Image (cartoon, helix red, strand yellow):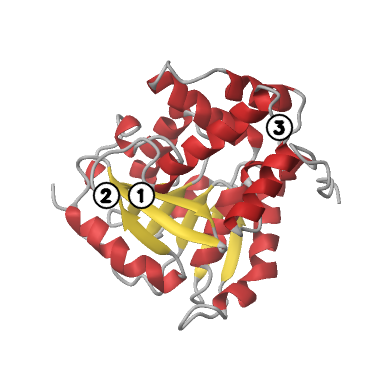
């Protein structure tokens, strides 16, 4: 079925579902052209924190984008109201398949007929959670990394996505300071994440086996690559609970993957040490959440 592409994108909001680490960063990027970004999260405090994050950084980021100017972010605790008249809705909820199925079925009913429905899922293709979606031709994977510093985006069809949706996003997203790349066939982990998963898993294995420590692995990574942060710092930024969810998903698809990396992650998650968002992960030098 053909899809009618959204119009008046300059005067219509973008809505982000989920106010976590990536949700607020996605909202930040869509607030760089002077428009309104809506952030829905049932946790009022999380939505307010996400709005504050956007307000703090949007002028600085918009200044790096040609034609950019600071927009505004607004928190909602009612999903239907948040998506009303949005031209794009980006789902950024936890990596749980049942949750994503429910959210997309709701969005398909609530969003405007010409709204594009995108998932920021880091490991699930959208084909896995469109069972309750009538208009699958407007659903697409749009996976962000860690903007504004890591601003590449994977785009991937759900198998029935209208070709015009992909072409539209490939042309439109660079206006917001992000760089889209199309996965040309369905791929768990998309493009860069497949490569990163192998690096991350081996780094975890080296520590799980007692060969090295997170700090030493990261320091060697910095020396040999010239990059500012290593794999363990990066995992702390994402959230170790999120990293574990992703690894569990990969393992479900490939039971031959080693258990050691997941056991190491699970020990931190069970202790409540999730990384930056809890003040402690592989490293202890983060501000406490209360601060």
For the residues marked 2 and 3, what is the alpha-carbon distance in whole angstroms?
46 Å
Q: Earlier in the sequence, mark 2 or mark 3?
A: 2
Helix, strand or loop under label 3: loop
98 displayed left or right of 27: left
What residue does disc 3 label? 212
Mark 3 neighbour density, 10 Å: few (under 14) some (14–19) many (20 or more): some
Helix, strand or loop under label 1: strand
Task: Estimate the x, y position of residue 275 in percent, counting from the top left.
Answer: 72, 40
Q: In this picture, is 75 found above or below 234?
A: below
The residue at the point 56 percent across, 74 percent down is 71
Q: Nearer the viewer, residue 41 or 256?
A: 256
Task: Estimate the x, y position of residue 26 in percent, counting from the top left.
Answer: 52, 57
The residue at the point 29 percent across, 34 percent down is 127
26 displayed left or right of 153: right
Mark 1 neighbour density, 10 Å: few (under 14) some (14–19) many (20 or more): many
Residue 255 falls in which quadrant of the image?
top left
Q: Nearer the viewer, residue 269 or 33?
A: 269
Q: Nearer the viewer, residue 115 or 279?
A: 279
Q: Is residue 44 visible?
A: no
Q: Which mark is residue 117?
A: 1
Q: Which mark is residue 138?
A: 2
Task: Estimate the x, y position of residue 48 in percent, counting from the top left.
Answer: 69, 55
Q: Nearer the viewer, mark 2 or mark 3?
A: 3
Residue 148 falls in which quadrant of the image?
bottom right
């Amino acid at each position: 079925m053909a899809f009618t592409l959204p119009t008046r994108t300059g005067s219509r909001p973008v809505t982000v579902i989920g106010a976590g680490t990536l949700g607020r960063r996605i909202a930040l990027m869509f607030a760089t052209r002077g428009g309104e970004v809506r952030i829905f999260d049932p946790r009022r405090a999380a939505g307010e924190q996400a709005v504050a994050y956007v307000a703090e950084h949007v002028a600085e980021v918009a200044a790096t984008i040609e034609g950019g100017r600071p927009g505004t972010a607004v928190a909602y605790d009612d999903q239907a109201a948040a998506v009303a008249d949005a031209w794009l809705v980006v789902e950024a909820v936890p990596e749980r398949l049942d949750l994503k199925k429910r959210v997309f079925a709701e969005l398909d009913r609530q969003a405007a007929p010409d709204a594009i429905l995108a998932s920021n899922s880091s490991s699930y293709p959208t084909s896995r959670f469109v069972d309750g979606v009538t208009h699958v031709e407007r659903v697409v994977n749009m996976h962000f990394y860690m903007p504004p510093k890591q601003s590449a985006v994977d785009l991937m069809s759900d198998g029935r996505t209208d070709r015009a949706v992909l072409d539209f996003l490939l042309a439109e997203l660079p206006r917001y300071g992000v760089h889209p790349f199309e996965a040309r066939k369905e791929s768990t982990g998309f493009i860069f994440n497949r490569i990163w998963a192998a690096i991350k898993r081996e780094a975890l294995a080296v520590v799980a086996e007692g060969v090295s420590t997170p700090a030493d692995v990261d320091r060697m990574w910095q020396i040999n690559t010239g990059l500012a942060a290593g794999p363990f710092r990066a995992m702390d930024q994402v959230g170790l609970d999120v990293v574990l969810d992703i690894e569990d998903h990969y393992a479900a698809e490939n039971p031959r993957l080693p258990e050691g990396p997941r056991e190491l992650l699970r020990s931190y998650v069970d202790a409540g040490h999730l990384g930056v968002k809890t003040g402690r992960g592989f490293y202890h030098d983060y501000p406490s959440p209360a601060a």
